[in-house]
Amino acid sequence: MARLIQTATEPLMPVEVDLVTLDLVENGLRNARYEMDEVLFRTALSPGIREQHDEFPLIGDPEGKMVVGQFGLSIPDFLENFEGDIEEGDVLLTSDPYSCGAAISHANDWLVVMPIYFEGRIVGWSSMFGHMSDVGGKTPASMPTDARTIFEEGVVIPPFKIYKAGELAEDSLRIILNQVRKPDWNRADLNGLVAACRTASRRVQEMCARFGADTYTSALDALLDRNYRAMKTLLQMVFKEGETLSFTDYICDDGVGYGPYQLKMSLTRTGEKVLIDLTGSSPQAAGPINYFINENLMRMFFGIYMITVADPQILWNDGFYPLVDVKIPEESFWKPKYPAALNARNHGIGRVFDLFGGLLGQTNPDLLNAAGFSSSPHFMFSGNYSSGDRKGEWFQLYSIGFGGIPGRPIGDGPDGHSLWPSFVNIPCEYLESYYPLRIDRWETISDTGGAGLHRGGNGVDVSYRFLEAGTIAIHDDRWLTYPWGVNGGEPGTRGRKWIVRADGSTDIIASKVIDVQVYPDDVLHFVTWGGGGWGDPLARDPELVALEVRRGLVTSYGARRYGVVCDDDGNVDDAATDELRAELRSGRPDPLPTFNMGPPLETILARCEEETGLPAPHPPAPAL
């Protein structure tokens, strides 16, 4: 465990904080968190961070508990696993999930942690991790879909001081950067992470100077306690005493031919506390889809979902952790044994939110969302220019795909959107300026969102036309199982990928592949899945359906899923619509099912090759 060196010995004392000061501190922290983002975006070079914002900041209290930030890392778990002294001016770095208690979850994420000192005492922590577009290893972008150990996934950095008392460890950094394909990107991105953490440190020190360190840290305690009290109320409102709720979803495959992997989550409230239990989930995967998550991060995800859905005005933080117990079985999908491969954990992260949605909504329809775009699928393209001024120069693209957000109690799911609220699309102009490709199409696909009173968001078709030979890699999911609908809503459609070769032939591509060769004028269709629908499709306003037909979001044929008869121009036949809706109502169950998962899993597997053009995965086998 880390030993913290402080030159001031007097303890920080709790004091009363008036509401105006508390509001000033809260908003100062909120602004500092967004300033961290901006510093990184303006410093980074890789498109994943600079353009798409694949990074997650945090500002913590003196113990490392998050007070403001994005989700996805845990300072207390990092400190618990760091051996050595930490003093003023130190900046720590790691990319090894197994050496930091799963504070991060794969080797592409470089985590920077920095103590914040004021007058010789630690008054907080700043931290940030960003997804490095390449960390070496056997394949460009360092995310081999066929990896079976973390050793195949690139350089894995143990926790160490990248800065010691303000001095950069140049030799160590030189060794690390010698392992990667784009060292200029990695160095710039790392500099941005460090600069962002130092920015947060300055803002915290300014607040300590303005209000006093005792008042500042007492304000943090008040913000943490506010979340504790809010969560205690929410838990008693949403969950019945002693009742156990369970929900199961799936990851379609692991990249090496096995699947689907069952993800089961159960929740029981006893008194003021709840227990989240992941027992019943599949054992760790042979391939790299394992999501190594610790108990604190599972608490964090639970709190994000509860607070954001129930009261999004609350600035969520770690204050509620004592109210949530977590049980994660060893050597399971969620807690694999070293040295299991981890690079494709993005599917598990996203599926956590589908699991919480299916779990929490069983007792409270206001919290029940359909399944949505619960992943951040990756597309990678790399090679060498063959001619011109850049002949022989290496190019490498890493980008994140978008899809359909689920239908929700408050309305339709957005079309072509990211799972993560802060992520943005890489502009087509950027891609075409910096890479040898053209975007033939970037559009939503009609009818891919599940039908419902509130429609699921549509998936997208991004069509990449390659101008140079190279290799591509894809990380995606939901090609086998369906994004389910709720409260009578229908599932969204599945994702799919194919290449139209320059000679006119077509190759169907699996959802997880590496080292697929492409040539000039080949076109990859990267089609993502839609969100599930919410509520009875026959209750949707026919004029709204007609409007979406005119906008190209629903076809006239797809309008019939809502019981709406219209032509391609969106002109509704009212009499035919009434007749069709009566016919559809007479042939369905009453009440409508809470969950519509699509066909049974056995049927999906039996029809897999016929429907997808890909062989069905084998039942999961023990990891070797």
Image (cartoon, rainbow, N blue to C red):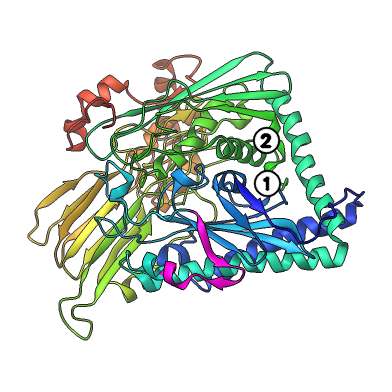
Residue name at image x 22 percent, y 64 percent:
465
The residue beneath circle 1 is 65
- Residue positioned most to the left: 503
Specify the segment rendered in magenta. Answer: 159-173
Distance Cα–Cα, label 2 vs label 1: 10 Å
Q: Amino acid at mark 1?
A: Lys
Residue name at image x 22 percent, y 86 percent:
389
| Element type at mark 2 | helix
The residue beneath circle 2 is 321
Q: Position of residue 336 (x, y in %)?
A: 40, 34
Q: Quadrant of the C terminus?
A: top left
Residue name at image x 62 percent, y 45 percent:
76
Q: Quadrant of the N terminus?
A: top right
* 85 relative to 323, above or below: below
Q: How many marks?
A: 2
Q: Nearer the viewer, residue 295 or 349?
A: 295
